[in-house]
Amino acid sequence: MRKKKVIAVAAIVLLATFAWAQPSAEPTWVDLVDDLSRSQLARYELLQYTDPGNKEVVREFVFPEHANDGVYGVDVSHHNGQVPWTNFAVSGVKFVYIKASQGANFRDPKFEANWRASADAGIIRGAYHFLTAGADGAEQAKNYLALVTKSGGFAGNDLTPVLDLEWDFEKVGDAKVDRWSKLPVDEIVRVVKAWLDTVEGATGRRPMIYTAASWWNERMAGSLLLKDYPHWIADYRQLNFKNGAPLKVMQHDYLVWQFTDVGAIGGAGVKFDVNKLKGKDLGVLSGK
């Protein structure tokens, strides 16, 4: 009887080990080539949602000259081409977020190279996913997690995962239509929560939501269902930058402010989106 019990336990352990060892199926990835850059979305917001007297944007930010009054970072994607990672490390760039994926099977073709190179350069890094309205949130999360895993995985000091939640355009005739406009608030929240819960369950980190207040305040109708997640706000308005505060999501605070897309290292070369941390402790972006 005891022998049978031992055999049964051994079989269970063997099966469990076998199941754990099987790699999850990777998505059939499609490289992003015509996704909108943050600069294009920022211009759209300024044209559609800003008063005539507040359309001026922050036009210059140079590392390290302008980065001495806080904690500044950048975000990059394939739109930035070849990223000068070594220059970042010595120019006052304290952190970087890298675009990883979009939808259920799209990937940024530069992500794997950027993810590895940023670690080699000693830059504190994080990865973000652009959420689309046409695919299940959990499936999109699996796309994101599979790509990060393939690219070397998360390290202990990496920043918390980020969900990019804003305009998801499709072309209808000659017009651009935000796919989210077709969904009620509770359905948007369901898709968002599915991504957030899946990623948090897999990483043990509470993700951060990147958004523009103009999108959120229109699409989310004042919903507080996502108020427990930290926010990263995009607002390029020069007047708001001078006043020291972005246009915020209703009844939500923020941790990071993306205020320009023309940041430069030493004033020359490729331009980058620049972000300022609220406060001076990067630990708030750990998600732990």
Image: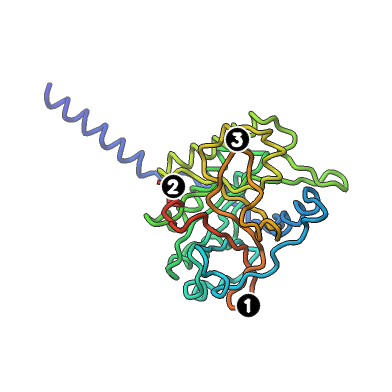
Q: What residue does disc 2 label?
A: 287
Tag 2: amino acid: Gly
- Residue in view at x 83 percent, y 54 percent: 52
Relative to 1, residue 174 above or below:
below
The reply to whether the C-beta atoms of the residues labelled 3 and 1 are less than 8 Å apart is no
Tag 3: amino acid: Val
Mark with earlier residue (3, 2): 3
Disc 3 packing (10 Å; few <14; some 14–19; many ≥20): many
Q: Front-most of 242 and 21? A: 242
Residue 44: image location, x then y, percent: 77, 53
- Furthest toward the top, the residue is 1
- Furthest toward the front, the residue is 243
Q: What residue does disc 1 label?
A: 267
Res. 190 image quadrant: top right
Q: How is the image coloured?
A: rainbow
Residue 97: image location, x then y, percent: 53, 58
What is the CA distance from the residue labelled 2 to the residue labelled 1?
33 Å
Mark with earlier residue (2, 1): 1
- Residue in view at x 68 percent, y 58 percent: 236
**SS under mark 3:** helix
Lateral position of residue 224 relative to residue 183, left or right = left
Lateral position of residue 196 relative to residue 106, left or right = left
Residue 193: image location, x then y, percent: 55, 35
Q: What residue does disc 3 label?
A: 191
